[in-house]
Amino acid sequence: FEFALKSTDCGQNESPDLRVAMHTPPTATGPDAIRIEATAMTVGARHAAPLLTNYFFTSMVNQSSSAAGVQNTIGVQFSTRAPLSAGSAVRVTGLLGGATPDGPVTLFEGDADLFENATWVRETGALTFFWAPGNGSEPSRSYSFFFLLKNPD
């Protein structure tokens, strides 16, 4: 019995694969021994340490209109220090006071095709989106997209 765990939390240039295996007979002591095989982490770009603390180099949100009751085009731009793998979630918060109800949101233009499952939560003023399968970010590259929210009346 064996399965691989892939770290989806960014913190390394390359997320290590951890393998959890149970062998019969077990290679460690005890009838239900579990052996965890070490996987070496690769050295980062320019010989950086394999463990990187990720943060946003750039994070910018702007709007097209502050007029009451209109559809407002919200622009988002960001870049990160370390790559984010496919399936990683990114959340934009602090967009309080809008009139758009909770639910899915369509991202458009820019790099919108790299993301999926964008969801808006009105109460918290948060947009959450995920890197689509087969995609992931490159360190220091700027990503951008737009979405619509209705301004309060």
Image: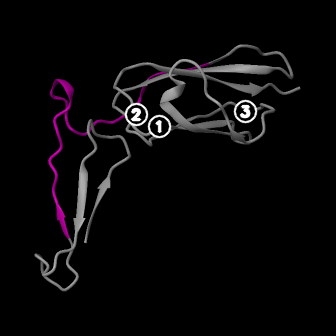
Instruction: Classify residue 35 by image quadrant.
Output: bottom left
Q: Residue furthest right?
A: 153
Whole-percent x, y for residue 153 in the image: 89, 26
Q: Which residue is mark 2?
A: 135
Q: Is residue 56 magenta?
A: yes
Whole-percent x, y for residue 108 in the image: 61, 23
- Image quarter of the N terminus: bottom left
Q: Residue at x 76, y 14 (%)?
A: 65
Say the numbered circle drawn on residue 96: 3
Badge 1 crowding class, 10 Å Cα cut-off, few under 14, some 14 to 19, many 20 or more, is some
Q: Regarding mark 3 in the picture, which secondary structure is present there?
A: loop
Q: Residue at x 84, y 27 (%)?
A: 152
Q: Is residue 55 magenta?
A: yes
Seen in the picture, residue 17 relative to 102 is either above or below; the reply is below
Q: Amino acid at mark 1?
A: Ala
Q: CA distance from mark 1 to mark 2?
A: 6 Å
Q: Regarding mark 1 in the picture, which secondary structure is present there?
A: loop
Mark 1 touching mark 2, by CB under 8 A?
yes
Instruction: Classify residue 123 by image quadrant.
Output: top right
Seen in the picture, residue 79 relative to 19 is either above or below; the reply is above
Q: Which residue is mark 1?
A: 132
Q: CA distance from mark 1 to mark 3?
A: 26 Å
Query: Which one is in front in this view, the residue at disc 3 or the one at disc 2?
Result: 2
Report the magenta residues as a range: 35-61
Badge 2 crowding class, 10 Å Cα cut-off, few under 14, some 14 to 19, many 20 or more, is some
Q: Regarding mark 2 in the picture, which secondary structure is present there?
A: loop
Whole-percent x, y for residue 75 in the image: 61, 19
Label count reads 3
Badge 3 crowding class, 10 Å Cα cut-off, few under 14, some 14 to 19, many 20 or more, is some
Whole-percent x, y for residue 61 in the image: 60, 21
